[in-house]
Image (cartoon, helix red, strand yellow):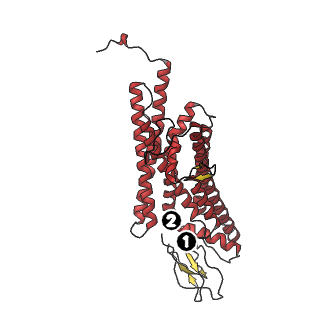
Amino acid sequence: MSDPAQIAPLSDELANSLAHDVTLTTVEGVLYGLLSLLTFIAVYLLIRKGLRNSVARLILLTVTFVMFGCSTAIFAEDADINIQQMKALGPSAPDLDGILKSNLILQNYILGDGVVVWRAWILFDRYSPFHFLLATCLLGTFAIPRRDPFGSLIFRPIHSIELVFLRSGPEFFSLNDGLLPFIEPEELGSRKFLLTVMLLITNLTATLLIGYKAWMYRRFFKNHDSNRSKSQIEKILIILVESGLVYCAIWILVICTQAGALSLTASELVATIVPHAVTLYPIFIIILTSLQKSHHSTAALIRASSQDRRDGDCEFGQRSTLAIGSFRAAPGPAATYSSDPHITQSGVDQTGSALQNSVSLSSDRDRETRPFKSTPIIY
């Protein structure tokens, strides 16, 4: 047994390094625990709603599992590296570990951006110019600009984003084909910065478009029912906008880190948070989508914004259960809405109204007859 008198105390530098590693591991552990909880909730809600008849839910479930798997691998690798460093109080792990982690983070970036863009995408009509805007932002995120031998600016395919994360140096190589050239540190830094800016622009654009639809939704209902309280859909949209702004703030912190505006400790803390934040936010969106049946809500928002411009004449009642559908005008008897959570289909306006779509909010105590014929939206 060692003599306590022979055990030298840690130097201040080593003690600070040990405390730093413990802090980073603790923060990452808390984030991973929260991520695990949200993943369990998202999977439960998606399975409970049924997967057999919904391709969208199958895709969302797959994305959830893949992103959670990447975050699990990142957490396990970081924990192992920190434990080894605390044992040896030595240098950082080899570059190969950094390359593996970078590729896992990249996958989460791609999938996370896809979920965020999808959530804004389905708020608009099929041929909306906003679809082109979102697609352009997404394409800009997945391609890295560079100069060809003739000096022209071109974009490399999606796999070249990996270059942004790999360390530069004479030993530089690619996990794909081993043929990618050495990148100067200045160019590597520029690519990292450009990718982060594009991620920020993509998420900010999606957040602003969701905010725009929330405003249109609020204006539409305010024009037709000034006495109503804030609806559940409106609350969910506000949460999406607020959480989207927080997510954008994280990317701003990353940009500040790359610009050297933050201290080393703050930069490492941001680097620990970001890989899990890019998983937390999309899974949070999936949970909100599942809880609110947001595909139906989305269709309602599209109709609300378009009908408001056409001065569609609708009346709205109140009830605790929100029922949302899509409608088409056609000759026939009027539609009757009951207190059942599902919308009853039976007819159309006698006057041949040009109104194609509408949102129905009916109440148990206030059953009204409305001029629509329902066509359910399948999710």
Q: Earlier in the sequence, mark 2 or mark 1?
A: 2
In the image, which disc is placed on residue 71?
Answer: none
In the image, which disc is placed on residue 293?
Answer: 2
Q: Are marks 2 and 1 in contact (CB under 8 Å)?
A: yes
Kindly identify the residue that appears in the image at 51 percent across and 61 percent down.
289
Residue 248 visible from this viewpoint: yes
x, y percent for residue 182: 51, 40
- Residue at the top extreme of this rendering: 5
x, y percent for residue 282: 51, 54
Residue 312 versus residue 144: which sits nearer the camera?
144
Kindly identify the residue that appears in the image at 64 percent across and 87 percent down.
352
Residue 245 against residue 4 in the figure, above or below = below
Q: Element type at marker 1?
A: loop
Q: Quadrant of residue 124?
A: bottom right
Residue 279 visible from this viewpoint: no
Q: Which residue is mark 1?
A: 324
Q: Quadrant of residue 308?
A: bottom right
